[in-house]
C-alpha cells in the first residue's frame, strides 16, 4: 500500500509539472511582449515594427514593447533573442539583413536555422537608391557615368558590413560596373548627415525611412530595386527601367526562440495576420511604401531558406564581401 501511495504521489507531482506549461500556454500572453529590433530607432525596420504594435497589442490583450538593440549587423539583438526563454515574450523583429548576416558569417554565436523559429512575414517593401543632393547627376544613368569617370573617388554607405543594404549596393556596383568605396555605419539613419553633405555619394535603403526625404527633395532618388515602382514614390523608376538588370525586394518578419511551444507561435502568427489586415495599419504602411503581409509560419520558413541560399551564393561568388 505504501508503495502504491508513493507511486500515486509521484504521478501527481509529474501531472502538476506537466500541466504548468500547458496552463502557461493557454494563458499566453499574461504580460507585455518585447519586439527586439536590431536597428536604431527611426530606421525603416523600426518604422514597420511600430506601425502595427498598438493594434497587435490590442488583439493579444498585452502591450507590445518595441526595443531597439543595434550593433554588429543585428547579431547582438538576434543572440539576445536566441538566449531568451522560449515562452513567446521575447521576439525578434528582423529583416532581410538577418538572413544575409547569417548566410555570410560563419562566426556568429548562433545558428539561425536551428536557434530561431519562424512566426510570420510582416511586411514587404522596396529598397531605393538615394544619393547626395550635392552630386551633379540627377538620374541613375548620369550617376553611373559619373562613377565610371571617377573610379574609387566616391563612396556608398550601409548599415554595416554584410548587411542587406551593403550587399544590395555591392550587387548594384557589380551590375553597373562601377568602382566605389564601402563605408559602414551603425544604421542608415546614422549615415544621413554624411549623405546630405556629400561625404557619402549614395546608399540603398528601405523606402519607408526615405519616403519623406524623397518627397521633400532632401535626397536624390535614382531608382527602386523591385520589379515595379513603389506606390508611395511613383515617380521614382525601377532599376530595370534605367537600364540596370537588377531586382531585389526587402521584407520584415517575426521570429521566436527555438523550442517556443507551437500553440504560442500559432497565437502570435494569427494575431500578426489579423493586424496586417487592419485597414488603418495597412494604410499607414502603404503611405510609407510598405506592403502589409501577415503570412503563415510555413511561408516564412520557406522564404528564410530561399533567401539564405540566395545570399550565400552571392558571397561565395565574391569572397571579398565576407566580414573580416
Image: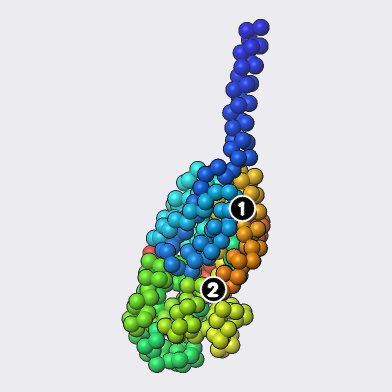
Name the quarter where the N terminus is drawn.
Answer: top right
Question: Is residue 120 in sight in this rendering?
Answer: no
> 323 or 304: nearer the eye?
304
Q: Position of residue 287 (x, y in %)?
A: 56, 74
State if disc 1 and disc 2 touch (CB < 8 Å). no
Question: Is residue 68 in sight in this rendering?
Answer: yes
Q: Nearest to the eye among marks 2 and 1: give it.
A: 1
Q: Label 2 vs label 1: CA separation?
A: 23 Å
Above or below for 287 versus 149: above
| Residue assigned mark 2 | 288
In primary-sequence order, the first of circles 2 and 1 is 1
Residue 187 position by quadrant? bottom left
Q: Residues within 10 Å of mark 1 (few under 14, many from 20)?
A: some
- The residue at the point 40 percent across, 92 percent down is 136
**Colouring rule applied to residues:** rainbow
Residue 249 left/right relative to 44: right
Q: Judging from the image, what secondary structure is the residue with disc 1 in?
A: helix
Q: Judging from the image, what secondary structure is the residue with disc 2 in?
A: loop
| Residue assigned mark 1 | 59
- The residue at the point 62 percent across, 59 percent down is 275
Q: Position of residue 284 (x, y in %)?
A: 57, 69
Above or below for 167 versus 270: below
- The residue at the point 61 percent across, 57 percent down is 272
Q: Residues within 10 Å of mark 2 (few under 14, many from 20)?
A: many
Q: Position of residue 138 (x, y in %)?
A: 45, 91
> 255 or 171: nearer the eye?
255
Amino acid at each position: 500500500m505504501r508503495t502504491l501511495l508513493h507511486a500515486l504521489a509521484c504521478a501527481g507531482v509529474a501531472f502538476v509539472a506537466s500541466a504548468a506549461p500547458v496552463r502557461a500556454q493557454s494563458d499566453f500572453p499574461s504580460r507585455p511582449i518585447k519586439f527586439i529590433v536590431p536597428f536604431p530607432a527611426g530606421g525603416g525596420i523600426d518604422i514597420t515594427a511600430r506601425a502595427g504594435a498598438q493594434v497587435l497589442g490590442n488583439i493579444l490583450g498585452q502591450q507590445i514593447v518595441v526595443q531597439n538593440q543595434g550593433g554588429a549587423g543585428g547579431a547582438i539583438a538576434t543572440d539576445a533573442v536566441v538566449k531568451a526563454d522560449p515562452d513567446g515574450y521575447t521576439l525578434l523583429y528582423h529583416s532581410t539583413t538577418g538572413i544575409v548576416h547569417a548566410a555570410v558569417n560563419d562566426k556568429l554565436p548562433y545558428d539561425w536555422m536551428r536557434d530561431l523559429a519562424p512566426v510570420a512575414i510582416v511586411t514587404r517593401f522596396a529598397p531605393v537608391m538615394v544619393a547626395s543632393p550635392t552630386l551633379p547627376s540627377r538620374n541613375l544613368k548620369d550617376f553611373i557615368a559619373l562613377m565610371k569617370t571617377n573610379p574609387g573617388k566616391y563612396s556608398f554607405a550601409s548599415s554595416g558590413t554584410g548587411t542587406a543594404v551593403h550587399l544590395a549596393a555591392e550587387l548594384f556596383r557589380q551590375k553597373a560596373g562601377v568602382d566605389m568605396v564601402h563605408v559602414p555605419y551603425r544604421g542608415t539613419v546614422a549615415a544621413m548627415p554624411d549623405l546630405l553633405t556629400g561625404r557619402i555619394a549614395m546608399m540603398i535603403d528601405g523606402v519607408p525611412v526615405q519616403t519623406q526625404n524623397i518627397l521633400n527633395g532632401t535626397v536624390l532618388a535614382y531608382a527602386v530595386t523591385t520589379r515595379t515602382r513603389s506606390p508611395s514614390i511613383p515617380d521614382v523608376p525601377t532599376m530595370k527601367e534605367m537600364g540596370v538588370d537588377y531586382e531585389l525586394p526587402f521584407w520584415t518578419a517575426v521570429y521566436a526562440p527555438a523550442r517556443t511551444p507551437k500553440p504560442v507561435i500559432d497565437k502570435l502568427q494569427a494575431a500578426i495576420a489579423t493586424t496586417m489586415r487592419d485597414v488603418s495599419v495597412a494604410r499607414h504602411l502603404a503611405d510609407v511604401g510598405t506592403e502589409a503581409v501577415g503570412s503563415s509560419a510555413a511561408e516564412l520558413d520557406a522564404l528564410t531558406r530561399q533567401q539564405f541560399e540566395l545570399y550565400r551564393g552571392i558571397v561565395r561568388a565574391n569572397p571579398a564581401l565576407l566580414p573580416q
